Image (tube, helix red, strand yellow):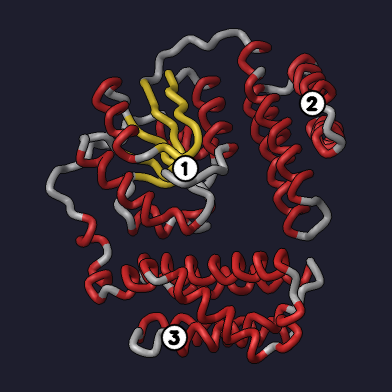
Amino acid sequence: MTAEYFERLWQAVTTGDEYAAGEVVVQALGAGLDAETVLLDMVGAVQRKVGHEWAANRLTVAQEHAATAINDRVLAGFGSVLPKPREHRGRITVACVDGEWHAMPARLLAEVLKVRGFRVDYLGAQVPAPRLVAHLHRTGPDAVALSASLATRLPAAHATITACRAAATPVIAGGAAFGPDGRYARLLGADAWAPEARAAADLLASPLPRPRAGHQPLDDLPHLADQEYTLVSSTSSALVKAILAGLEDRLPAMREYTSRQRQHTAEDLAHIVEYLAVSLYVGDEELFTEFLAWTAEILSARRVPAGSLLPALDLLRAELHDFPRSRAMIDAARVRVSNALSS
């Protein structure tokens, strides 16, 4: 039964019919599907498929945004078709890390927690740490559920986790940014991690222990003392310009690029530098190599030569000749991309 309603919801959101999408959800609930199944195995699963189809170049950016907006509106009306749950399990604040616009995972968790009887303060996308901490002091929740989808938000997540714990509020982290096994959640000091909404709600059924005072961010990441992260992140614009100029010398066809093509290339290079910086921050070269492998797949799906990544990495490595950790990460990523291109 769930599969039937999933397909109907998929058709509705991908054809831009928000009224049909709302009707499918109402009908699924009326047919006996429980609220969590509708939220996670229909709405959440459709949203994941939207992301996969965009990555495979079978949905445009505009179609992806439209589908996400429809799912968001479906969730906005979700509470009106359910009886109000009786709150009895404590209060949870749900928020996205500052700079994180992908709010759907956090929104789904908030709805699941409400269904399970929690009082939920859903703060939405990109919540600055000071605003979040002010909210914690005002409301005194039992925990913060912090969401981040993009790994480039990990430094901001670290600052937010540290601030919440300093306010004596435990943090449960979730979202793709924290790694498939939650390694970055643990590294950055979160009190708990969950791979998806049901697991998070299960963990929050028992109170998380209150954090101890006195913890410092550098305790988690002693490698930051070498300043490579700070220097790479602060010079990212100059690095992108240098790589772009070098690519024009190595790849003459780039000289004929339109301004739009140059802009897209510069954006891709900026993402590469940004992911290198965050990999330096967490001290994990796998994060950078996985991103480059994913980028190669995205470029290939869009019929852009993924081989252009190799000279870009070479140029970046030359710019960072005094940065041993950076060069080691670039070398590992180059091997990964080369192997992917030859397979």
The answer to whether residue 153 is seen in the rendering is yes
Circle on res. 319: 3
As measured in the structure, the alpha-carbon distance from the residue carrying label 1 to the one carrying label 2 is: 26 Å
Q: Residue at x 68, y 82 (%)?
A: 308
The answer to whether residue 181 is seen in the rendering is no
Quarter of image, res 258: bottom right
Looking at the picture, how far across and down is residue 67, in whole percent?
75, 38
Residue of label 1: 147
| Pointer 3 or 1: first along the chain | 1
Secondary structure category for the residue under label 3: helix
Relative vertical location of residue 22 with respect to residue 321 in this rendering, above or below: above
What is the three-letter code of the residue carrying label 3?
Glu
Looking at the picture, how far across and down is residue 334, in whole percent?
57, 85
Q: Residue at x 44, y 70 (%)?
A: 236
Q: Left or right: 306 with respect to 330? A: right
Q: Residue at x 67, y 37 (%)?
A: 44
Relative vertical location of residue 313 with respect to residue 75 in this rendering, above or below: below
Q: Disc 3 vs disc 2: which is toward the camera?
A: 3
Q: Left or right: 67 with respect to 160? A: right
Quarter of image, res 14: top right
Secondary structure category for the residue under label 1: strand
